[in-house]
Image (cartoon, helix red, strand yellow):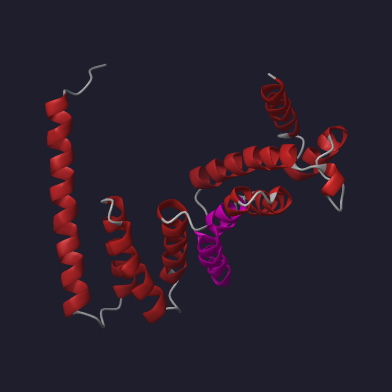
């Protein structure tokens, strides 16, 4: 195993930046010169995404907005809304606006980005301290990723499912049963709750994770 030298890393970063600059240039040319091109929604999405990856999220958001305004019927609009949500969540730290954008993805439930939007809604609720609402969103994601017949490829499905199960436990551990209409959050109910949500294959891991969370707070 060899570590790259600082000079090699810098050269690699410069090469990537040059490639991204060239990509943006060509995408812009297509958008400006071929507005009726049948794949323009995809071009707008990748133009916005490339700019976002270049730490130019505000510039990228311009093209996501153009995508969703001009091509709302395209499945790529779902990805545009999701990336607008990511802009508000990660860059602007505006949870309310992020939630609104993620919720717009609900109009595109057959797209692969939909389960990810529901998952990020859960994190919006966490940031607002609404743990029970977060729990519901993570439960929805767990349901969406339960079957291999969904819209996600297997690696993405499994990865998102693991994250949702973990964050479901996190949300459960933060709910105060005294203020829960359904009395959620009671440790004595965890096994039955987790069995119903994650199934027998996951319940033991979920209970162990809950115990770890409780112990970390008592330390």
The residue drawn where x is 15% and y is 34% is 10
Say if residue 173 shows up in the picture: yes
Q: Residue at x 16, y 26 (%)?
A: 6
- Does residue 36 appear to the left or right of 141 in the view shown? left
Q: Indicate yes or no whether the magenta region holds residue 211.
A: no
User: Measured from the top left, where is residue 133 in percent x and y?
Assistant: 70, 54
Task: Give the main secondary structure, helix, strand or loop, of the magenta stretch.
Answer: helix
Q: How many marks?
A: 0
What are the residue bounds of the magenta stretch? 95-122
Give the side of residue 160 with respect to residue 140, left or right: left
Q: Quadrant of residue 192?
A: top right
Look at the image and tell me whether residue 151 can be seen: no
x%, y% of residue 22? 13, 57
Q: Nearer the viewer, residue 55 or 77?
A: 55
Q: Give the residue at x 76% y 43%.
A: 175
Q: Nearer the viewer, residue 209 or 42?
A: 209
The N terminus sits in image quarter: top left
Q: Is residue 120 a member of the stretch shown in magenta?
A: yes
In the displayed structure image, the side of residue 94 where residue 174 appears, left or right: right
The residue nearer to you, when weighing 164 against 111, is 164
**Where is 29 relative to 181, above or below?**
below
**Rendered location of residue 104, percent (x, y):** 54, 70
Q: Quadrant of the C terminus?
A: top right
- The spot of residue 98 in percent (x, y) is 51, 61
Q: Which residue is rendered at x = 32% and y = 69% of the image?
A: 62
Instruction: Tell me: residue 142, above or below residue 7.
Output: below
Q: Is residue 143 above or below residue 12?
A: below
Q: Residue furthest bottom?
A: 36
């Amino acid at each position: 195993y060899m570590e790259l030298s600082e000079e090699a890393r810098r050269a690699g970063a410069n090469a990537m930046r040059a490639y991204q600059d060239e990509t943006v240039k060509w995408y812009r040319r297509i958008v400006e010169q071929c507005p009726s091109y049948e794949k323009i929604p995809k071009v707008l999405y990748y133009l916005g995404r490339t700019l976002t990856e270049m730490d130019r999220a505000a510039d990228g958001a311009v093209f996501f907005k153009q995508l969703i305004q001009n091509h709302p019927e395209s499945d790529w609009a779902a990805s545009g809304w999701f990336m607008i949500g990511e802009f508000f969540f990660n860059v602007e730290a505006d949870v309310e606006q992020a939630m609104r954008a993620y919720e717009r993805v609900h109009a595109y439930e057959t797209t692969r980005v939909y389960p990810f939007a529901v998952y990020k809604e859960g994190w919006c609720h966490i940031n607002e301290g609404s743990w029970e609402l977060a729990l519901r969103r993570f439960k929805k994601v767990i349901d969406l990723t339960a079957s291999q017949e969904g819209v996600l490829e297997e690696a993405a499905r499994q990865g998102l499912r693991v994250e949702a199960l973990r964050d479901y436990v996190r949300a459960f551990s933060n709910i105060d049963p005294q203020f829960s209409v359904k009395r959620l959050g009671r440790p004595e109910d965890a096994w039955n709750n987790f069995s119903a949500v994650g199934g027998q294959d996951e319940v033991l891991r979920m209970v162990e994770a809950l115990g770890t969370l409780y112990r970390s707070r008592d330390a």
